[in-house]
Amino acid sequence: MFKALAAAVSVVAVVSLAGLPLPALAQTQAQAPASTQAPAQNAAAQTVTDLAGRTVRIPAAEPHRILLGESRLLPAIALLEGQDPLAHIVGWQGDLPAMDPQTYRAYAQRFPNIGQIPLIGQSSEGSVSPEKALALKPDLAILSIIGEGVGLHNPLVEQLEATGTPVVFVDFRLHPLRDTLPSIKLLGQVLHREAQADAYSAFYSAHLQRVQSVISRIPEAQRPKVFIDLLAGAWGAGCCHTAGKGNFGELVEAAGGRNIAAPLLPGVLGDISLEQIIAAQPDVYVATGSHAKSGGLALQIGAQTNPQDAARSLAQLVARPGFDTLAAIRNGRAHGISHNYYDSAYNIVAIEALAKWFYPEQFRNLDVNATQAELYRRFLAVPPTGTFWVDKPAS
Amino acid sequence: MSIPLNARPLPLPHETATISQYRRLTRRRIACLVAILLLIAASLLFDFNTGPSGLPVTTLLRTIFDRASVDEPTRVIVWQIRMPYAVMALLVGASLGVSGAEMQTVLDNPLASPYTLGVSAAAAFGASLAIVLDLAIPGVPQGWIVSANAFVFALLSAAVLDAVARWRGMSTAGVVLMGIALVFAFHALVSLIQFIASADALQGLVFWTLGSLARANWQQIGVLAVALAVSLSLSMRNAWKLTALRLGEDRAASFGIDIRRLRLGTLLRVAVLSALAVSFVGTIGFIGLIAPHIARTLLGEDHRFYLPGSALLGALMLSLASIASKILIPGVLVPVGIVTALVGIPLFLGIVLRSQGRVS
Amino acid sequence: MNTMTTTTTTTTTRAPGLSIHDLTVRYGRRRILDSLAAGVLPRGEVTALLGPNGSGKSTLLRTLAGLTAASGGRLTLDGETLALSPSGARSHSVVYLPQALPAGVRLQVLESVRVAYCATRGHGSGSTHTTRDADIAHALSVLQRLGIGDLAQRSLDQLSGGQRQLAGIAQALVRDPQVLLLDEPLSALDLNHQFHVMQMLRDETRRRNMVTVVVLHDINTALRACDRAMLLNRGGIVGFGRPADVVTPDSLMDVFGVVARIEPCSRGTHQILIDGLAPQADMASR
């Protein structure tokens, strides 16, 4: 008798719970997808194709409630939004203060209310709360295809679309060289800042063209071999983490360098032993750094770092045991650069800095500082503080 | 001649006392199950009511009964997020609970869990093949590719385990060891795939393996509900035999129970349920390990009570974990797999210390 | 070649009881039991299975239980052939109690007996229309007859070894078996329970007219409490018949390599006293 009771209870419980979705299913099936449903007041909406290949319908009105899948998209947005980049941001992921705190502080100094922007998560995709994101009722969502925020395959994407919010994906990380300009153009379209987007694109292209026109004339065999030490020193005294095809590897290639890790790693990122680096004998060594705590063995660099600290930290890095066997370091061709350029609309600055290191003769007249100054002056509301690259270690 | 049952006289007075005591025990156990069911209902409502968007109860109720009166985001929050997550927590918890109970009986090992067969690790491997290498089963709709792969590989690992166990005539201890070996093997394979993964695929894979209810949708709930209903009814049909198994394999065999068939059927049920659970929500640990222990303490090992009790306790535990994941750190959604581990570990240590290592 | 002592009872296979015909059990290439044949193990009598370690006692018992596959020979009960695997109807005729009793089982004694009864219901003997109360009463009556009725509500993991053994026997008896097989039921028991269990086995064997086969280590228990003895050595039957006929100083010397004598006690029963080990020369030739 009891068996029957137990079975009945469990079946009833389970079936009634399973019966709940029927109204919901009916509801969502009747719901037209957002991309074909235009709000009544928008007569001239446009259709864009985002960096994930998705076709999205954008309303004609300017967005006033923007949700950012990663707060590290702020510098890109800032390029187009001019003097008040935070005005229309209604919520974002918490990756900027966690992973690039110096930039965050630079913006906080200029815009103290940055801390009041609601967070939809911390610094990993697993911490995103879809409910929070939806409760913000955004009228536009700008997400990165990959990153530490809402990614391409996150169920939140569909949920946002179901509420009528247009969702567009940009990319500065997966294929930085290929995707930076299209991403800027897309941002210009969705934010209705086409003029600013065109201006930045022109700036970017001109500087890129200048570098590549020189490099394209140099045959492959004469290009310098380069090793990128990603987040150098972060792995203790051990060595080394680097990028293969993609990430910083792509920037190195764009600047005319031959990344020694490219043929070695099957994926984007990987570890290479010091022995292997020595065997490859790179001509140039580049260390990257991010939000290192001061005092540790790491590259000090960023929007709030002074040049002396940066140079000193680089000197500590190249003084690690075994590194003096590298010709690059003995010949003084050891440099440091901010790690965050791997996912940044400003990567043109990094490309110039790298190019100048790789080809000091050809780029004798290239003034990277001037490029950065121009970028900040023309497009950004924050001043160009800090150190983002280090030419040589402190002696 | 043996005394036929029908010729038995009426029970004597002191026998009646024992019989009524036994009946009282049965009633107490049923009451316990009903109490857990009520707690589940309460937890479900609480879970449904909790969330960072601060929607008041009145709004929640209106969204259910008068759909048009609320705006779209609220509808999506209630129907696509709150409800499916809460319901999925119950179904996955129940699946893991009953699977853990059956595993611990069939393998005669109180440390067994649904993942002992390597199901979860194999599912992660299947998912990694889909996410990183785009290797999918042809004909499966896009949204189900990863889950389908995970499911197939989970079943495959159970099948391999069973085949090897039968080929070598393995004891249950051997099966457990073999399962552990499979777990390590699949973990290593997943690491290998991660090594060659592109950046976005890697992120997708890491996100997938993290135990989280946030991928739940209604179709998955439907599939799991059906599977759970079928599996649970099959389990209850075997309840007497599984209880007999607790008296010892040889004794049970001499009662006429086909041990191999019982074990195979049980492992198959466990594999299917836990494979589904893992493929939908990733690896959520400790429920399948702890719920059976608590059920055993409350209800004894008569599987007619123990199995449903384990299912209900698993559902309750995961529902509470789901609530905890929302309110533990204000403003932050802690992945539910982390919550179950944080709570499960001290609970598990408590169990071990209380029994002072006397578990068989 | 197996030697058999002559018995005074009839050896026709039509007599009520269990008969073993040319039973062979192999493990790989090794023959554990080699064409074992024995006359009838009669109903209503307790047969002790004796022999040194490795003689095949447990294997024989397990083969009788159907848990170990025989590669040759057959078994008959009352002249009818017994199936070799414990499924279906056979499981209601033959019940086997292994040596090891599981620990840490949270079942009450009464529940465990009921499980033994209900586990395979509806196959052959035992009515299928009994109410639950009748189940419980039946289980309880078995417990009472074994003298452990007051332990009905206790959990198995709280019993002593002796009590658990009796509970195990109750689980077996509730199935109304024709053949009861026990593997060393007295090994872990104190003197009191050893006596009690053997007493219960004898009483129930007589009352239910079962064939009871018990593997024993203690020869004296066999002498005192069993009706028959079967002495095994190296996979063959060395003696089968009344215990006093089978267990002799010679057979003990042959099989166990001990020097023993059998002394009659004041009450007429016999006691075996071991004086020492066999001389080494004899040991080597064994």
Image (spheres, rainbow, N blue to C red):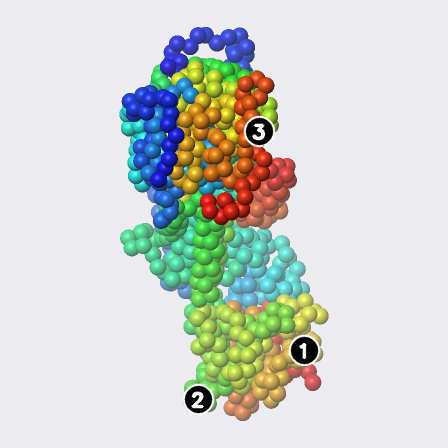
Disc 2 secondary structure class: helix
Q: Distance between the residues labelled 1 and 3?
A: 75 Å
Mark 2 and mark 1 residues within 8 Å of each other at the beta carbon: no
Disc 3 secondary structure class: loop
Q: Is residue B47 left or right of residue A179?
A: right
Q: Residue A221 carries which label?
A: 2
State the image coordinates of residue A209 (x, y, percent, origin top left).
45, 82
Q: Which mark is residue A316?
A: 1
**Is residue A340 in view?**
yes
Which residue occupies 62% across, 47% down?
A: B329
Mark 3 and mark 2 residues within 8 Å of each other at the beta carbon: no
Which residue occupies 55% across, 66% down?
A: A75
Q: Where is the N terminus of chain B found, in terms of image quarters?
A: top left
Q: Where is the C terminus of chain B found, in terms of image quarters?
A: top right
Chain of the residue under label 2: A
State the image coordinates of residue B33 (x, y, percent, origin top left).
51, 27
Residue nearer the viewer, A156 or B276:
B276
Which residue occupies 61% across, 87% down?
A: A330
The residue at which mark 3 appears reads as: C189
Disc 1 secondary structure class: helix
